[in-house]
Image: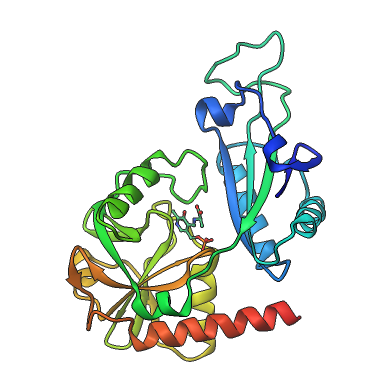
């Protein structure tokens, strides 16, 4: 597995950062996860735009322009000996230099950001897993109020996701003040009476690239949909519940807190959307 660190391509095991890197000490950085199919990054420009928004959100200058990112990413993708990849991109506020305090909350001056990328094989759901669906639990969304920033400081998300793992489930569906926000590492959609419902983008959730694709496909194929606040009661009374992300794509949640969602099997709209998503992927990959 090859990695990229601050301008160099190297084996992943050799990628090392100084212990005082602000990513390590403070979780002071942002990231992206880009799915790569047959060595073609999916929706790369959208991921790079979101990276820019995250960098702006933490007041860190983007070390590369779009072309610079694209060139480095395509080189890294080409170096891997597997075709379908989950590409990880991380930018941190770098490492304080000689003469600066080793650990100080204040931004260090004149320090270049640390840029780290690597790819691992992309493991998407098998047809059998899709046919079975997954279970989820709910939890109170106790994260900070800037969840639209894809920050590497994921402690809250990790603790929330672990609640699902401990219950032998795949995801934790989060509720804040009685309304659906998102999953610990995914966006959540609800289907009720044939209408697809999605929570509106805000500072309380990360607007997924997959979320955008799903809504675009719904619009393009005449699937009734509404982007609006979704109450806890609506989540619990859903005919279908989906989780979406770059790595999970569109996955039906069939049990929530031990209670079957709708008929307790992946719904018809989930199956249709997964089909549309797969065809869209094929179409983009051929272009
Ligand atoms: N996570 N919301 C959160 C909190 C996420 O962490 C993710 C993705 C999403 C979905 O975004 P997208 O469709 O762009 O993948 C929503 C990635 C996959 C991760 O952290 O591994």
| Residue at the extreme top | 99
Give the x, y percent position of residue 97. Answer: 71, 16
Give the vertical position of 259 relative to 3 (above or below).
below
* Quarter location, residue 102: top right
Left or right: residue 187 versus residue 105 is left
Q: Residue at x 63, y 31 (%)?
A: 93
Q: Residue at x 48, y 71 (%)?
A: 125
Q: Nearer the viewer, residue 122 or 146?
A: 122
Give the vertical position of 175 relative to 60 (above or below).
below
Left or right: residue 88 versus residue 203 is right
Give the vertical position of 220 relative to 76 (above or below).
below
Give the x, y percent position of residue 173. Answer: 30, 59
Give the x, y percent position of residue 83. Answer: 70, 66
Left or right: residue 198 versus residue 1 is left
The colour scheme used to paint the residues is rainbow
Instruction: Assign the C terminus to one quadrant of the image.
Output: bottom right
Left or right: residue 83 versus residue 269 is right
| Residue at the extreme bottom | 222
Q: How many marks?
A: 0
* Quarter location, residue 45: bottom right
Give the x, y percent position of residue 230. Answer: 28, 68
């Amino acid at each position: 597995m090859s990695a990229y660190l601050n301008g160099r391509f190297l084996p992943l095991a050799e990628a090392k950062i100084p212990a005082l890197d602000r990513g390590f000490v403070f979780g002071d950085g942002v990231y992206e996860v880009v799915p790569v199919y047959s060595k073609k990054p999916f929706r790369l420009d959208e991921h790079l735009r979101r990276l820019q928004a995250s960098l702006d959100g933490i007041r860190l200058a983007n070390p590369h322009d779009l072309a610079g990112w694209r060139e480095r990413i395509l080189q890294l993708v080409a170096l891997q000996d597997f075709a379908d990849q989950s590409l990880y991109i991380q930018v941190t506020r770098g490492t304080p230099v000689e003469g600066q305090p080793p650990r100080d909350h204040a931004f260090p001056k004149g320090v270049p950001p640390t840029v780290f990328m690597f790819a691992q094989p992309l493991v998407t759901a098998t047809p059998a897993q899709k046919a079975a669906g997954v279970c989820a639990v709910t939890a109170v969304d106790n994260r900070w109020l800037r969840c639209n920033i894809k920050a590497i400081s994921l402690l809250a998300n990790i603790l929330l996701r672990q609640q699902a793992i401990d219950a032998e489930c795949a995801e934790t569906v989060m509720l804040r003040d009685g309304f659906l926000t998102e999953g610990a590492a995914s966006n959540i959609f609800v289907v009720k009476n044939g209408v697809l419902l999605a929570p509106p983008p805000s500072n309380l959730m990360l607007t997924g690239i997959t979320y955008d694709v799903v809504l675009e496909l719904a619009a393009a194929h005449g699937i009734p949909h509404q982007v609006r606040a979704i109450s806890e009661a609506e989540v619990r009374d859903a005919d279908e519940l989906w989780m979406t992300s770059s790595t999970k794509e569109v996955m039906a949640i069939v049990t929530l807190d031990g209670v079957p969602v709708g008929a307790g099997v992946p719904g018809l709209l989930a199956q249709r959307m997964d089909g549309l998503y797969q065809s869209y992927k094929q179409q983009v990959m051929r272009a």
